[in-house]
Amino acid sequence: MADSVFPNSSSGDTAHTELWQPNRAASKISQRIVATICGAFALVSVATTIGIVCTLIFEALEFFQEVSIWRYLTETQWTPLFVNPQFGVIVLICGTFLTSLIGLIVAIPLGLLAAVCLSEYAPRGLRAWLKPALEVLAGIPTVVFGYFALLFLTPILKTFIPSLGAFNALSAGIVLGFAILPTIASLSEDAIFAVPHSLRQGTYALGATKREAITGVVLPAALSGIVASIVLGVSRAVGETMIVTLAAGSRPTLTLDPRSSVQTMTSFMVQVAKGDAPYGSTEYLTLFAVGMTLFIITLVLNIFSFWFVRKYQEKYE
Amino acid sequence: MTTQQVSESILPKGDNTNFEPALHKRYKIDKIFKTICWIATFSGLVVLVFLIGDILVDGIGALDWNFIVSPPSRKPEDAGIWPPLVASVYLIAITALVVIPIGVGAGIYLQEFGGNNFFTKAIEVNISNLAAVPSIIYGLLGLFIFARVLSPLTGGRSIISAGLTLALLILPVIIVATRESLKAVPDSIRMAGMALGSTRWQTVRAHVLPQAIPGIMTGTILALSRAIGETAPLIAVGAVAYVPFAPDFSFEGLSSKFSALPIQIFNWVGRPQEEFHTLAAGASIILLGLLLTMNATAISIRNRFQKSQ
């Protein structure tokens, strides 16, 4: 681009440049060097993705040479650290499913309603305070959320549900829900806020009340953005680690009972990594097999989100 | 959205020839809906208040000077957070040193040099993909690449490995923040720079980048404050539960075994004795204090910048 602006920069016209003779060649070389370096930096993010995929495939393949993929997918117990190990990953997936489901039951309705409130009902001045406050909630380290779930929420829930264990999926799931609520609220709010005003006014002109305009027209118009925010929330819930490790315990059980302790994929990974597994041992390799499973799940969610947004995105003038 | 769908969704069901607006009833539903929306918004804030309140009530008793400058200990009354706190500071320093040049450089390339080609688009898709990858997966990447393959350079499961892992974790955030800030600089400035005969890079360095720096700083500090509270990737890379001395600021110190503030909290919460829970709450207060300071700095930079515009 810069070249086309100065077609004569390197030749002729020396009469005018006796006093001012910029070193154009040097400027161009430095421009090229900087652009190359910056381009290489941009490649680091691609290299990260490639690194993640290669790491997982490389180490997981080694795992599947020891344990057949069939055993991994069909066994119904997860006891990789025992003498007679069983590798039924379905147990961990079930734990992740349970805590994520509870979290999403909390986060989706609350997040969406909060988004509607921030975009449609809250006065501008108040909105300027509420949004950063929710961002603070999003910035709380998850290990602190885990403390809160284990030592604050669980004892309180126990007074209502006496059969609740000290570690349980319920309180981990609820706190997990509040941890991902800001993600869903903030991104949905962006989508809802972007719906053009003319749509709302048209609906009012047809005689709708405000609530009817929101649920009947504005939310459907913002659907693609809302679904994208929910899918991101789901991947956060599935990949969340510290809350479930601290509050849901580490007993791998194939159950959907929210009162019992479960182990998720992530909390299993923490359990192994904490134990300082030596490189190349079966425990160490399990880490990558489970990581691979987790990565595939979030990847599928992400691809679904891309497809959905592309298919249903509304374009406005 | 067609008109028919609209009318189906908002008009009362039934015989449309005899139209009953039933406004009274509909306004009532409106009011209930609005109330629920407000309750939902404040539920998040109520949880935030309870969380901070709970941490303060539990942990304020543990806080004193000794708590900050002592190493962790088996005896709760002697225990402190000095080594993990120092390690956390070093971690963030390494992360910042690595991620700021790379992230800002990548952002400059994508926004100023890259144009609208396949390469740029591929990187964009890649960055939004990375945002959904769980942080513990980055930990596995760090464990394999930095702690194992590159162990001669990083010292294995060390502060350097962990810092590099956190850098990769927040890299997408920094790239996006840089691009957004550069996008906000008006094009007329670029035109003016080039009209005066400077190259694209000279224009960016002397005119565009200085205007974008406050936005980049805000985004960077917020991303670093996220990194300082991350626990899962550090555990995956191989943080240990107990380190008796604060690491030196030297290659030996930075390539040795490490703990970090969130790891220490995790370790204390996991113990059965209540005294350690108090310590965990105390350490959480320090961690939240660090985070809030960083956030407040970021927000004040943003506000000052917005005023001067």
Image (cartoon, coloured by chain):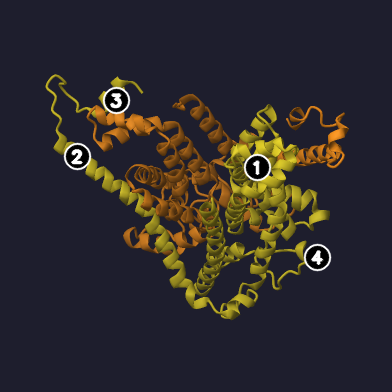
Chain colours: A orange, B yellow
N-term-proximal mark, 3 vs 4 = 3
- Quadrant in which residue A199 is drawn: top left
N-term-proximal mark, 4 vs 2 = 2
Front disc: 3 or 1: 3
* Marks 4 and 2 share the same chain: yes
Give coordinates of residue A29: x percent, y percent.
Answer: 84, 38
Give coordinates of residue B173: x percent, y percent.
Answer: 60, 46
* Marks 1 and 4 share the same chain: no
Label 1 lies in what chain? A
Q: Are marks 3 and 1 in contact (CB under 8 Å)?
A: no
Give coordinates of residue B60: x percent, y percent.
Answer: 48, 75
Query: Does residue A98 show up?
Result: yes
Can you say whether A128 is above or below A154 in the image? above
Query: What's the CA distance linking mark 3 and mark 1?
Result: 49 Å
Q: Viewed as shown, does residue A169 lie left or right of A66?
A: left
* Marks 3 and 4 share the same chain: yes
Query: What's the CA distance linking mark 1 and mark 4?
Result: 33 Å
Residue that badge 4 annotates: B252
Query: What's the CA distance linking mark 1 and mark 2?
Result: 55 Å
Front disc: 1 or 4: 4
Residue that badge 3 annotates: B6
Kindly identify which numbered label has been placed on residue B27: 2
Crowding around mark 3 (Cα neighbors within 10 Å: few <14, some 14 to 19, many 20+) is some
Residue that badge 1 annotates: A289
Q: Viewed as shown, does residue A263 lie left or right of B124?
A: left
